[in-house]
Amino acid sequence: MALISKKKNIYPVSQRLRQYLKRQQREVKLPIQYRDLLRYENSIALLDKKQNDTLWETVFYAQHEMEYIHYSLKKVYAMLKADGDLSVMEHLYVDRIDLCVYGNTQPFRVRVVNRINDNFDYFYLKKADASRVYGLELEHWLSPNRISYLVDNDTLIEQHIIGVPGDQFIRQYLEDVNLNKIRLSKEFVKFNERCFIRLLGDMHANNFVVNITPDFDDVDYRIRAIDFDQQSYEGRKSIYLPQYFKENNPLIQIGLDCLTIETVKQYQKEERSLIARRYKLGKKFIKELLKAMSEDDISKPEYIATLRAELAKHYSDDGFLICETMGALVQKSLNKVLEQKQTYHFPISD
């Protein structure tokens, strides 16, 4: 079972990373900062449709501040979704601002509604943690998913990632007669592989969503990470393998029941080949990102020492032992993919 640290350190965005973000047009001047939303006057618990506490609180602001805050948030939404085209704001209004009081960085979630058809969307304001920014950027380049986010000073704006929360999917969908167990298991193997190769940790069922897509004669699944705080931070290899989190055990069991070792290896090889292809397509930008990451301080020295030793053992490659930063470990891990030297680890690992 994988266990992570109780509270992760927040690392500021370095100057080199910020330069990269500016070139990628991720660093922009925002009309409102995370700290501005901390000026709420009161809050109430947010309940779900069944009246259960969601552990989020809806916050309220003084009347003289509300107009400025709501207008600024609509402007941020236009920047995130429409490249700053303010005409999209015409029919939008901010319906609710929620605060996650139990989260490590206490993010705000903004619900925006189109008054013409009542369609709604969300986005998030968070503290700009370098680990999370690296995680978002690596997800954008190395996964099959595109990510939209913006950074300004110590504020991070993130799009909402749509999908069924992993814990809810496990509770409500695993007994569905239409569940395609083989396709779901294949996707979990590939998700497990993606997380391990780029060292994204803490992918238990609360930190990913499942997209369910009807196919012409069946259904398909895509598992997407939604929390990137644990990008290359912890020191134990198991943290970067979703298969080791007890919350994911029902998905693991389905895989054990319907997949063979040979098919698991096939799916791992497929995903490694796809990652290698994505790396080559974005090579210029990924190399620049990893250069910044390799020079950045985003973890504790003892965690780096532990992880490089475990990865060296896992891959039987002492080249990991000379890596001095988490960024260097990610680069070395990706190099293994580019070399196409396979070391399999699912469903049983040392």
Image (spheres, rainbow, N blue to C red):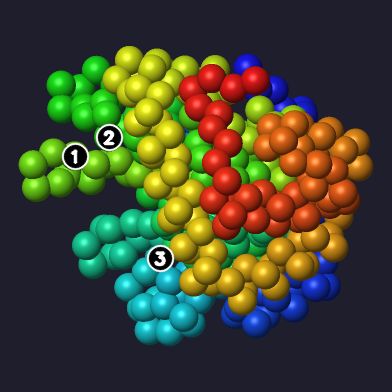
Q: Residue at x 15, y 46 (%)?
A: 215
Of the numbered discs 1 and 2, the one sitting upstream in the chain is 2
Q: Residue at x 40, y 24 (%)?
A: 261
Name the spot of residue 138 as percent of width and height, x first: 59, 58
Q: In the image, 184: left or right of 51?
A: left
Instruction: Name the element at disc 2.
Output: helix
Of the numbered discs 1 and 3, the one sitting upstream in the chain is 3
**Residues at marks 1 and 3 touching, judged by CB atoms closer than 8 Å:** no
| Residue 288 visible in this rendered orientation of the protein | yes
Label drawn at residue 183 = 2
Quadrant of the image for the C terminus? top right
* Pair 1/2: label in front: 2
Residue type marked 3: Tyr
| Residue 227 visible in this rendered orientation of the protein | no
Q: Give the CA separation, mark 1 to mark 3.
A: 35 Å
**Residues at marks 1 and 2 touching, judged by CB atoms closer than 8 Å:** yes
Q: Disc 1 designates what residue?
A: 219
